[in-house]
Image (spheres, grey):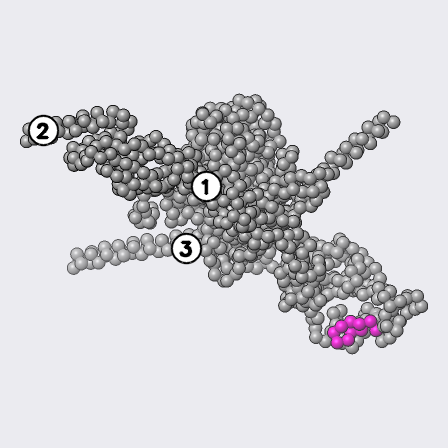
Amino acid sequence: MKRIIIIIIFLVLINLASAQKLEIVKESKTELIYGDNLNVKIKFNNPYNSNKIFEIKEILPQSITLVNPKNSEIEYYNGIKVDIYKWNINAKPNEIITIEYIIKPDNLGYYSIKPTMITDTSSEEVYKSQTIDFFVTCKSNNICDEGENSLNCILDCKQSGNDNICDYKADNICDPDCEEDPDCKIDNKFSLDKRMIYIIGIIILILIFIFIKKMKKSK
Amino acid sequence: MKKRVVASFIVILIIFSISFVDAKEARTFEDLLNSFVKIFNFEITGKATGTEPTISITYPSNNANITTLSITATGGSTNANYVQVRLNNGAWQNVNGLNPWNTNLNLITGSNLIEAKSCAATCSGIRSINVNYYECINECSLNGIKQCSGNGYQTCGNYDQDFCLELNSVTQCLSNEICSNGECVNSCTSECNLGEKVCSNNGYKVCEEVSLNCYKYSNVIECSQNEVCIEGSCVSQVIPEDKCQDNTFYNKCSLTKPLYCEEGELINDCETCGCPGNKFCSPSGNCIDEIEELGEDEEISLINHAPIVSFIEIELGNDEILSLDLNEYVLDEDDDEISIKFNDNNLIYTSEIIDCNLEDKFLECDNPKKSNIKEILKLIASDGIEEREFSIELEIINKESGTPPVADSGKDIKAYVNSIIILDGSKSYDIDNDLSKDKKNYIWYEDNKEIGRGVSLNLKYDKTGEHKITLKVTDSSGLSSEDKIEIDIMDKEKCRNTNTIYFPEDTICNNKWPYIQGSLIKINSEDYACNLFEVCDDSIDYIIEDAINCCAGITLNDTKKINVCNFAVRYSNTNPKKCQGLYLIKSLGGNQIYMQDYFTAEMCCSGYSQLCPDSKNLYKAKPKPNTEVNLKGLKCYNTKENDARIGKWVSDTDMSKNNIALFDAPAHVSLNILSTGTCNDYSIALTTLLRKIGYAQNQVYTVTTSNHAYNLIKLPLDKKYTIADTTGNNEPPIVLGSVPQGYPYCESIKFCYNDNGQVKCPELNKINGCEGLRKTGDKYDPLAEWRKYFE
């Protein structure tokens, strides 16, 4: 009987413990076009049966413009400046809190937003969300503009172009950004052949010169 | 001449002597000079009137509260030759003018004493006032005005001890509200119901929840080329003009009874087309089981639409394997579960030309046995009620034409017993561009025996010896070529005193921390290169294995690692070494796999207030890093009075022995113990990992500047270096082809290091995104371009 009671108490405790779980969901689009805003939504619950004050800290990536809120707190990590959104929210028992913010990426390419940190101010316990990743693609205008390359704007920038991206590919274009490229190998062969032609040409000229000199002497 | 000089000297000496008597209270050279000026004026101008000079201060007023650091004090005087003012018992300073006079003063925070006096032959009494200065700027313009902050608002007012206006703490708006013009208002007005779809141009919009309980239409989702939007959904266009969707001609009965093709639409018309099996024709045109029992609604649910099938034509190379998802070709309007079999009711088909099998709704066929021939596979699709026969026409062609590919199995490899060797065939190419990265196109052989397939292949040997490996690549035309490499498996020559199996061949290190090996380098603290860049440490080998597994296509056991791996694979163009490098760089970025956050405690302990956001933590080992290792006892030995101490990591077990003030952490400490670091630590950890995975000594560096540290990495096949910064999980840590933002990375480069010590940093024109820039402090060299040309 005692054993059963202990087991029941144990199970109840497990249930209580598992009930007290703060969950965070962070959502945003995973792909957007350059110039578009990115809406980020953070949802979390207060799993406790009492009011709790939570501090929410969102460390923003570099190369973005703050749209809403426009102001952020700033921290320095050695030489780099980091924009941080912070909220202090008093959540009612079992309340689901939703926070939204809007940023605008300043560059093309792959971005990640670090996990949101939510601190239960009463216990100092820190919870983290997942990281969200998104890709900013270009608005195609058939011109490979500054900041665009074959990775982030394939519609405007041809592969193997001079864009600091090495596209190792046999496409009849020697990519100037590659240390090695199958097409450059072919070019090298040609340049070697040209060099040979020049050398042979020079030798022939020298021989003609010597021949003419000799002819003059013999006259 | 000599006499004149001597006389002048004596006169000057006399004047100085007199001034010195007057200046016996002078505390500074300026006081002395003022005394001299005073005497000199008296002596030269002789403007002593005998009337007492007076002094007054008109600005600032006594006990004024001032918010600007620099003020112009003004006042008046009478009977004076000069006026002097001093601030907070400092030196007396001559002011501009006499009546009125003015002078600029730089106040200090708190109470300031301003004293003034005017002098002629004698000086007036000293007039003094007190003013209070608090350094502050109005954060907002008008008391009581509200402004939005986050999803709440703040009100402008004076809430603290200074005299400036500031914003109070944020009053949060409700979760379904947003702050607009300082007020909490409902975030948006719904324009639709959740999930609702409407057509827009040749696409549709879906009603989504844009904020809590507020629904709006999404951007237009375009229908594909052969589709049109009808009632919010993309549907296939009727292909032939004179046929219905199931190829039934206009005004004819479909094979699926009781469907009838009327002006392109299939309608139920059992009167014309009859009913299947034992069903009855109802007046509405539907076929039903029993006439009496059914109401109108039920009638509709009983109609079964037979599966809709398409005729499929496929061109297959004689060396290709067919893998086809038949879900794309067989549809059922009723969403019934479809089953597919060959028309002989089997799931396996064997013929002289090809062998195929069906699994679920996937058709797979082996390499064709013959070429330049057609084969028709007949299949049956069934929705459980009705069946439809359809065919797949396979045209098998001999693709052996064009230029053969060029196999490239890389350079010969020297490796060590039990280390993972990565065979890299990614440099193979085909000028016809028909060499796909498919595993089956890259086959690796040792002694004519296949040892594996794929663009890259991981191998391990447990004995020393030489191995000859052949890579055979085959393009889609069936043309192939081979390349050979030799692998020499040796006993370890480097990192001899550790158990690591991942280390660079070109390192000078044989030991891990703590050991005296390598050159002594000083970044923050002083240590030996092999102690910081721990290329011989086996305790971080698991990270190298994660990178290898990621790039070998082995699924990693963690969502965060999978995200990072996806990034690495996406941007490495199947080059395994580039993939591994990108995995390691990104793993220290925003996904926070092996290191998390910024080690603020190190900076707080050092007393760097700018890098310690919470001033309560100054000179403390706080906040504690988020790590699974017990850091109990970790201390800060610096104090406000003695903050010049540079810390050092001394023990992995007794934390109290370590001083964390501005120290450089060995790589294993950053990665395994603290799981965090400052800029140097992130950079050192990354350099170590990249070196361990095989980046050469001239391919990866830790770069330091006056206030920061980051990495320079030459990724495989790239002509130039790329800058990466993972400090505090910086995002993005690397911008391929360019430079991360937020710091003058190119201009600030000072010193470069790795396990082989300090090395010369690459030129800026050899770093992506740094071309044409100059390092801070470098002089402009007009001939640089010419010199480069001649080089």
Quadrant (top left, top right, bottom left, bottom right) of the N terminus of chain B: top left
User: Few, some or many C-alpha atoms within 10 Å of disc 2 (few <14, some 14-19, many ≥20)?
Assistant: few
Which secondary structure, mark 3?
helix
Q: Which residues are magenta?
A: B260-269
Q: Residue at x 36, y 38 (%)?
A: B106
Sequence-first tag of 1 and 2: 2
Give the amino acid type for the residue marked by disc 3 in the picture.
Phe
Tell me the residue that label 3 is attached to: A190
Q: Position of residue B624 (x, y in %)?
A: 57, 31
Tell me if residue B392 comes above or below residue B748 in the rendering. below
Q: Quadrant of residue A33?
A: bottom right
Residue at which label 2 appears: B7
State whether residue B303 is above or below residue B151.
below
The structure residue drawn at horizontal position 65% and vertical position 49%, both measured from the top left corner, is: B174
Q: Nearer the viewer, residue A194 or B433?
A: B433
* Chain for numbered disc 1: B
Q: Is residue B616 above or below residue A203?
A: above
Side of B663 relative to B760 (left or right): right
In this view of the protein, which residue sits in the foreground, B397 or B546? Answer: B546
Magenta part, dominant SS: strand
Secondary structure of the residue carrying numbered label 1:
loop
Q: Which residue is mark 1?
A: B136
Q: Are marks 3 and 1 in contact (CB under 8 Å)?
A: no
Magenta region includes residue B264: yes
- Amino acid type assigned to the residue bearing label 1 in the image: Cys
Is B234 positioned to the left or the right of B777 in the image?
right
